[in-house]
Amino acid sequence: MPQTDLYAVFGSPIKHSKSPFIHRQFAQQTQQNIDYHAQLVDAENFDTAVENFFQQGGKGLNCTVPLKELAWQRADQLSARAEMSKAVNTLVLQRDGSLLGDNTDGIGLVTDLTQNHAIPLAGKKLLILGAGGATRGILLPLQSKNVLDITIANRTVNKALNLADEFKSNGKITGCGFDDLQNQQFDLILNATSASLSNQLPPLPENILKPGAVCYDLAYANEDTPFVQWGKQHQASKSLDGLGMLVEQAAAAFFIWRGIQPETFHVISALHHVT
Ligand code: NDP
């Protein structure tokens, strides 16, 4: 009887996580013998839960809100993209028993944009709303696609300025507040604030979209998020939510763990139908 390898996602809240569904679909499709479950773990219990999980034979972990920074601290080694993002969403047990930390959020976003939606990034002017953990995770993968420049706008302006400063050696990048966006136009606006989670919308000037511009909300919901609605109302050529990014970041984690790239199209479609 082949051994079942154990994987999980830790977070709080975690009840509504779609990750078990996604990874079970990947496992079925690629005939991998794995068990993947969601476990409620808060920041205070994180280190103990990680030790227990790997002592009990765990092979890999996903970490979500509010644990990504703690996972970054816990990892024994870090991939380059995780190192810069200061956040880890994927832990991998190494042969020597150490834990490698990676961050697949950015590559998940880039894959969803460029492969699933055929949105080119090279030479484009990007605006990222928000300067939290998600923005940290996506900056380097976006910069590596030869974008023209990136503007980060945040409610707390200092956080945007600091982040821009930290990533300026990888490409042209500026930080600002929402008020500084007047008279500017962008090809792609990424909403990486958590405003959608409370049904809110960051303040945006009316004429901020270039002709043909795309809006993309990292958040996802059963209905259009306020930002996806805003994009549609303002004639964005596409106005998308982050469900595809969720599935693609999971596919990248699955590849790291199992060495097999799962097919994502049908999993994204299935999620659109079950949500
Ligand atoms: P953080 O808590 O780290 O950061 C939240 C950011 O949102 C901060 O910049 C904060 O600004 C800003 N913000 C919060 N509320 C508002 C508001 N009402 N108006 C304007 N700005 C606001 O969150 P994360 O970076 O971890 O996550 C951000 C979003 O990305 C979430 O919606 C999350 O679900 C999504 N996400 C999606 C993924 C996917 O796979 N699709 C993966 C990772 C994240 P300030 O600094 O001023 O507080």
Image (cartoon, helix red, strand yellow):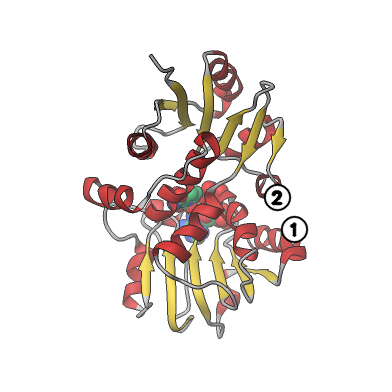
Near mark 1 (Cα within 10 A), the count class, few <14, some 14-19 or many ≥20, is few
In the rendering, at what x and y percent does residue 188 appear? 49, 73
Relative to residue 192, is residue 34 drawn left or right?
Answer: left
Please state which amino acid type lies under the numbered disc 1: Glu
Query: SS at mark 2?
Result: helix
Relative to residue 182, is residue 226 drawn left or right?
Answer: left
Question: In front here: 27 or 242?
Answer: 27
Relative to residue 223, is residue 215 drawn left or right?
Answer: right
In the rendering, at what x and y percent does residue 87 appear? 62, 43
Asked if residue 154 can be seen in this view, the reply is yes
Screen quadrant of the N terminus: top left
Tell me which label, 2 or 1, sits earlier in the chain.
2
2 vs 1, front mark:
2
Query: SS at mark 1?
Result: helix
Position of residue 249 relative to residue 238, above or below, is above
Query: Which residue occupies 28% across, 47% down?
Result: 271
Please state which amino acid type lies under the numbered disc 2: Met
Query: Which residue occupies 48% across, 58% down?
Result: 111
Q: Which residue is mark 1?
A: 166
